[in-house]
Amino acid sequence: MAHAAIRRYEGRMIDTVSGISRKLIAALALVLLAPLLIGAGESPAPDYAADARSIERLVNEDYAYLDRFEGGRMPISDKLRAEADAVDSMDELVRYAERALTTMADHHAITGR
């Protein structure tokens, strides 16, 4: 008789735990999938022009040999700087980055693409 009571109790515990697990999984799935279902998962269009404009700042902040350049800044012309605003695709961004890095005359400075 005691064994039957224990089995009934264990069965209820397993049902309770599995019920909680199912509810937890359902809640987690809802939280994780809700942004996709309501469209919040859409990423904004890339701003290639902003990325192009950031190259000069990134070089000035991170390039190790700025002392080679006059004024300790990346040698970029006003014309090339203005061209950054017209960049509107990944291919144009790579071409712009290559032209900008060419001004540094450092064969180690590459886009990696």
Image: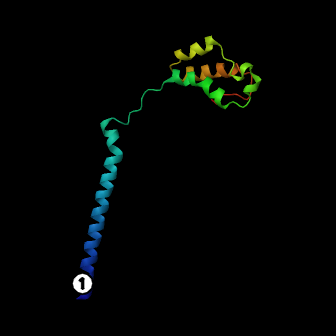
Q: Can residue 111 be spotted in the picture?
A: no
Q: Looking at the image, which residue is at 42% across and 29% down?
A: 44
Residue furthest to the front? 71
Residue furthest to the right? 68
Color style of the picture = rainbow
The 10 Å Cα crowd at callout 1, few under 14, some 14 to 19, many 20 or more, is: few
Q: Looking at the image, which residue is at 60% across and 19% down?
A: 96
In this view, 24 is above or below 101: below
What amino acid does circle 1 point to? Ala
Indicate the secondary structure of the residue bearing disc 1: helix
Q: Quadrant of the N terminus?
A: bottom left
**54 or 91, which is in the foreground?**
54
Q: Looking at the image, which residue is at 57% across and 13% down?
A: 82
Image x and y of residue 57, in percent: 61, 25
In this view, 79 is above or below 24: above
Image x and y of residue 88, in percent: 50, 19
Marks counted in the figure total: 1
Q: Quadrant of the C terminus?
A: top right
Q: Can residue 102 be spotted in the picture?
A: yes
Image x and y of residue 22, in percent: 30, 59
Please state if 82 lies on the left or on the right of 6 as rendered. right
Q: Quadrant of residue 16?
A: bottom left
Q: Quadrant of residue 100?
A: top right
**What residue does disc 1 label?**
4
Please state if 1 lies on the left or on the right of 64 as rendered. left
Please state if 85 lies on the left or on the right of 101 as rendered. left
Please state if 30 lies on the left or on the right of 82 as rendered. left
Residue furthest to the bottom? 1
Q: Looking at the image, which residue is at 25% across and 77% down?
A: 9
